[in-house]
Amino acid sequence: MHRFRLRFLAFVAGLAALLALAFIGHAAGRAEAAADAHLPELAYLKQVNAWRPPSDPQLVLLLMGQFANANRHAEGAVYLDALRQRFDAELNDTQRALYLTAIASLRAGHAHDVFLLRRIGWVRDTVAMLDEAKRLAGGDLYVARWMSGIVRSQLPALFGERDMALTDLQWCLAHADKAPHAGWLREVHFHLAAIQGAQGEHAAGAKPVLFTTPFSGDADSGHQFSPRALREVVPGTVYLLSGFEFTEYYFIVSADRKELIAIDAGTRPDAAREAHQALRAKVPDLPPLTTVFVTHAHWDHVGGQRYFRELSPGVRFIGRANYADELAHDANANPTTLQRFFGRGFRLADVLAYKPDMTIDKPTELTVGGTRFSLLPVRGGETDDAMLIHMPERGVLFTGDILMPYIGAPFVNEGSVDGLLAGIDQVMALKPRLLLHGHEPLTRIFDSTRMLAGLRPQLVWLRDQVVREVARGTPRAALQQANLVAPTLEQAPSSVHMAYLVLRENLINRLFDQASGYWQNGLQGLDALTDTDHGAALVDYLGLGESQIVAASEKMMADGRHELAAQTLRWALARQPSSESLRAAYRLANLKLMEKYQEFNPFKFILYGGQIDQSTAQMAFGAPTQAH
């Protein structure tokens, strides 16, 4: 039970928020009969959840979130309730609370579409479900109190739920340490302010999206995967600093306590300085930095190297012998894209100035201050210059980005599915006790060799299936919409189900790109039509006006087809760039896409936010910040 509750809290962050609170004034079309083919994530999560009650509750709430984001609340509530009844004999009370919370959330999103004479009863039944979920969870489960407070805060005064909403939300604020992460506090602060500011009346209105994601970022600082944190992974020896910028910072105090070793150098010198100084403040007797091991020469792993060089002329950088090949890839990336990921302070020149003092081209043993390291070249899934850094006596393995789900940066020509599989094999052969990756979500998702052993055969099946379909002429979009599920995936643990979801789309994209020329299946690449050309088709040839295009995009979004809406509006804006109505609809489509991917596709979250210059504040416990 205790383990389940921990996983329950640790993985559901942000997903319960996708209930699209629509008790007041938010009418959206329903698309219950829409084909799941246009929503492959929803189709996958329906299938995974139908196999058995997942041991990872994230999968239940991800399913709830995808139903809500697609405006299929009623269908989702019925679907999850059927699962709850089907699995009831296998569930404990915490799991029952999970299902009731998800069902009540979706019922809340459907309330506005309930016939008026039935609506009051519908709302009261929904609130009763939330109360039952709190009771089953013992009254101190953060997600149950949070959901109860958020839903109640949206109800009109006639329901008399203001005091209970305040009680639940204030409890969440007072017990913030029980939240999975600080991102949960966004909506707590927002709705408390709305209730208190309106003296009990609902003042905030229905927001188009809700973000409780751990992700954050803006144009100045770039993206962060998590709130700021500093923790001792191995007491007194290995320190992890998260949330200071795009990448993780790891520091190791040597066995003789005389030397400090860094794993990678971050993205920017200013961020590297801030992380290092935060560690010095935490550990006053920190020894001087002498060594930096570089897992691979990507922008976000060597861009801060200038700060470390300035600490001491004797600092040694140790990386792969073929680092220059990766720097050549780095140099070809779009500078605008890089700055959106890494912030305005990012400088490509800092990356390209990287040059290791010692290069590795074969397995190498090295002792620094009495601590033994094994440096192991590996191809990996992301770059050809990857290097594993193993601390055999501690059972700790630093993997860099060999398991990056995007199979290389999506905006450059790199990455290897076979390299990813080889990397998994090498990691499993080492049998480490602890896997530490280059980014927080990777450490959370790819957390053990046992999970990797279950994941590998699913990826082999998917690779072979995609290669066959590309050879048959199947277009990329058709592959994405086919909901490709390995036949042995059902027997795998829930942790593998989550990892497969995170990897599937990107693995298909990378293989398709590498197996195709510039003329691709489905006649992609034959023409040279711009967004303006497509906009001309809409406006000049089909004769559609602004109001007609906006109305069509609203219908697409009501049907959960946010990508289609965003693309259509982008075409129209290329033809009519000064249209405020088109731009407002385009903003909403991108917000819905950010909401959709806020838990399992951070790169999409970044890029959709970049289209509309949307910032997401980095939260900290006790810091009041509005949700948007």
Image (tube, helix red, strand yellow):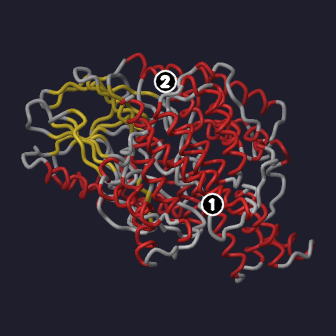
> Where residue 2 sits: x, y (%)?
36, 30
Instruction: Tell me the residue at 71%/66% (across/down).
Output: 27
Which of the two discs, 2 and 1, sits closer to the camera? 1
Quarter of the image where one finds residue 1:
top left
> Where residue 500 sits: x, y (%)?
58, 32
Give the residue pinned by disc 1. 592
Q: Please give left or right for residue 114 compared with residue 352 in the image.
A: right
Within-10-Å neighbours for mark 2: few <14, some 14–19, many 20+: many
In the foreground, 560 or 128: 128
Q: Please give left or right for residue 443 compared with residue 368 in the image.
A: right
Instruction: Tell me the residue at 53%/52% (across/down).
Output: 598
Quarter of the image where one finds residue 506:
top right
Q: In the rendered view, would you say 224 is above or below 40?
A: below
Q: In the rendered view, would you say 470 is above or below 166?
A: above
Q: Amino acid at mark 2?
A: Leu
Give the residue pinned by disc 2. 452
The label number, if any, that marks residue 219 in the structure image = none
Q: In the rendered view, would you say 150 is above or below 81?
A: below
